[in-house]
Image (cartoon, coloured by chain):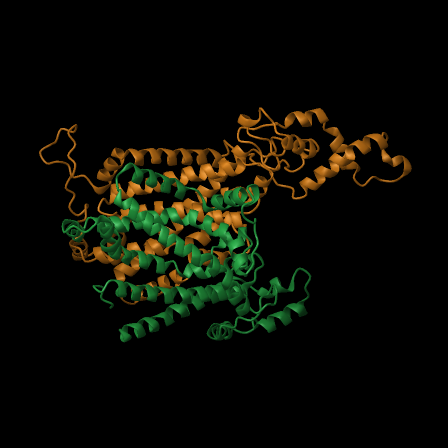
Amino acid sequence: MNANPLANPAPQHPVPQHPAPQAAPARGLWQIAVRRLLRNRVGLASAAVVAAFLLLILTTASGLLARDWDQQYAVSFAPPTAIAGNPQDDDAVGQGGTGSQIDPRAPVDLYGVVDPLADVMARIHGLSAPQAAAVAPEPTSVSGVVDPIGDALARAKAVPKSAVTQQRAVSLTLGADKWGRSVALKVVKGAETSVLVGLAAAAVATLIGTLLGALAGYCGGWVDATLDWLYGVFTAIPYLLLVFAIAAVLQQKGVTTIVLILGLTGWTGVYRLIRAEYLKHKAREYVQAARAIGASHLRRMFVHILPNVSHVVLVQLSQQVVGFIKAEVILSFLGFGVPVDVVSWGSMLNETPNELILGKWWQLAAAAVMMAVLVTAFAMLTDALRDALDPRLK
Amino acid sequence: MNAYLLRRVLQMIPTLFGVVLLVFLLFNWVGGDPAYVLAGKFSNPRDIENIRHQLGVDQPLYVQLGIFLRQVITFDFGNSWATQEPVSHIFLSRLGPSLALMIPMLVLETLLGVVLALAVAHVRDSWIDRTLTLLTTSAMSISLLVYIIVGQYVFAFALGWFPVQGWSSTPQGWVHYAVLPILLGLAVSLAPAIRLYRTFVLDEIHQDYVRTARAKGVPEWRVMLVHVLRNASIPIITNVLASLPALLIGAFLLERFFSIPGIGREVILAVERSDFPVIKAVTVAVAVATMVFNLLADLAYKWVDPRVELS
């Protein structure tokens, strides 16, 4: 009952500005879809937002922006510039207590490797600096005793105190986190992680789902039965539980791991739809015609049928990205996601409950707003894509 | 009917076997040797050998699979590696808090969702409908983590209306501790529920029988509550039954934030501590529950809508 637009590419919307030749040029599904998409204002706006995000990610991934997001630019919990005009009392205490004493060079070395003991070392440096000034005007070797932290002390003293305090800003555009890192840079860098994980996992899941769905729908028989059994197995276990189980087994953390976890478990929805499409299409005349001219099974599956169901694949891909971005945020929040030296919206949100209690809301606000904007834009783009590619679907 | 039931139950067996096989491969093959996890950082070869023998992982894989199958059938998954508590006891004792949280949440979500969806569908395309659509869209765009973090901070920490976290199994304790998590869970789940149920109601509201009912003078409330609701309830019931297995695992995040000793929190703890027996048991149990509830959903579908043919 579903007339395939490609099988019968009658132009549905004649466009006046093109002077029509004798026979109106046959327009494919994609041309029609692009036209429909361009007419959809909401779809265009959301596409623009998504494109802006992708551009942002391109700049961070290439290192143009936010490369040193883990650099400590400001004092601990420096407020956003907009509200920094009237500093509250507890902010002042916080800055005096921690900000001025921490050596800003300590946590990150030249190679961008984070020193896990940086905080402790910084405190030692800060505490012992005045003592050292009072006690040891001369090298310790006079008494023959070697000062075990002499090197560290010398380094700490070598940095002029005034330079240290000047380097650290008291306010940043979007404020700073506990370690004085810029929330603005973190949220931008976190967008890169979350979106790349979402895109990559969606690509993996859609690829698996499409391949298996094509096999099951096209081949039928025992192949279909086996794959349906596999589908039943994967859908019998709730999605997040399955993800947790795999996360428990795979001990190493990393962006690749989380992409694989999400991709290997998330293929079932695509599989079901693509299988149904292939079941429908394999009996169509154009596939029979391909068979009649001797096209092989593989050719019929992927050269003849696949382009005709590719709109389903694309909509599914787009839908999956949103789901996987959300899943990544939850996983990273729980600590099963990205490793500690990678920032994601999930790991940012993980820091926020404790910050809120101290009244530092800006990191939560930044991560929440960025995520809401991207998720909404992507979801609306998916709707627009679906409307443009398959108006019969609702 | 009986033949249908029997066939469906028999069909569950291969799926369940697949679940068991998947879990087994995951934990006994991909997961590597659990002896190194159990023996801790300071271990010697003899300890590791002992643990391997105790767990049976020095046996060939098919023997291990046999052991696991027996565990599944008797629902005796041994002891937790982290606390030595029997896994079946963990499962049963954590079920109560999860259900105490999830059942009220599901009931309220369904009732409020249906009532609001009927109301919105009744005034469809008015400014109320459009405002609510906008509200639900923006509500759905915010991460549920943000709801929980902000809700816990504002209502428990800042305003002090509710305890920040904790649990008690007495009725007063339930009122004391469960209300805020339930409200936050509702805040997250109500918007998508209204959206979904609104489309179900709108599908029915343009049908001929609705026009007939109006034409013969049936009052509007009766049209909505009796004629429309009865037909819209078919997909609603299916949807509610499909979400029942989630009752078993509870709401991971709510339980974790509010320190509620439910199954969801137990799973997160088990993942953090590499406590494989607990994860295995919960996964298998929830898979069984999912299959049973799917069957119940199909039966309920037939019961609500006699036109449906079970095949």
Horizontal side of B82 relative to A10 (left or right) equals right
Q: What residue lies at 12% left-to-right and 36% top-to-bottom?
A: A24
Horizontal side of B288 relative to A97 (left or right) equals left
Horizontal side of B34 relative to A279 (left or right) equals right
Q: What residue lies at 29% left-to-right and 61% top-to-bottom?
A: A216
Coordinates of residue A317 in the picture (x, y in percent): 35, 47
Coordinates of residue A213 in the picture (x, y in percent): 31, 57
Which image quarter is the N terminus of chain B in? bottom left
Horizontal side of B110 relative to B224 (left or right) equals right
Question: Among all residues in the image, which is located at the extreme right?
Answer: A143
Which image quarter is the C terminus of chain B in? bottom left
The image quadrant that residue B291 belongs to is: bottom left
Which tint was used for chain A?
A: orange
The answer to whether residue A342 is visible is no
Residue nearest the observer in this picture, A218 or B265: B265
Coordinates of residue A274 in the picture (x, y in percent): 29, 54
* Chain shaded green: B
In the displayed structure, B133 sits above or below B112; it is above
The answer to whether residue B22 is visible is yes
Coordinates of residue A21 in the picture (x, y in percent): 11, 32
